[in-house]
Amino acid sequence: MDFLKLFFRSIALLPGVVQGTEALFGAKTGEQKKDAAVEIVGTAINITDAVTKKHIVDADKFTKGLSMTIDGVVMCLNASLWANRS
């Protein structure tokens, strides 16, 4: 149950983190912005603590999944009106 709370908390943070990262690091590459977003979300949900408490048993896979999820959020945002704001 604790893992689901952790997972949903990380998912809920993604759109805001992606938008904030874009605003702060707009001139950086997409990969640099994604790395920043992964680090921000990882810190916010405290991946280290989750690993220590065994809520996450493979931090590398969790981080890779988080990275893939960020790609999906970016894809959705880019396909929406959000990307076409003037």
Image (cartoon, rainbow, N blue to C red):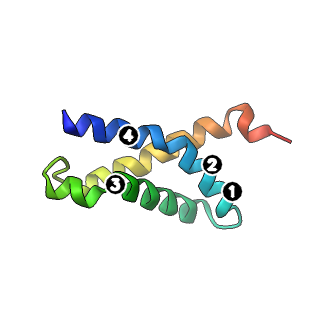
Q: Which residue is mark 1?
A: 23
Q: Amino acid at mark 3?
A: Thr
Residue under label 3: 63
How far is disc 3 from disc 2 in space, using C-alphas?
A: 19 Å
Image quarter for residue 49? bottom left
Q: Residue at the location (29% across, 36% down)?
A: 5
Numbered circles on residues, count? 4
Q: Tell me which label, 4 or 1, sits earlier in the chain.
A: 4
Residue that sits furthest to the right in the current view? 86
Q: Residue at x 35, y 53 (%)?
A: 64
Residue contact between numbered discs 2 and 1, judged by CB atoms under 8 Å: yes
Q: Determine which residue is flagged by label 2.
A: 19
Provide residue 78's location: percent of width, then percent of height: 67, 40
Q: Tell me which amino acid carries mark 4.
A: Arg
Left or right of 38: which side holds 56? left
Lower sequence index among marks 4 and 2: 4
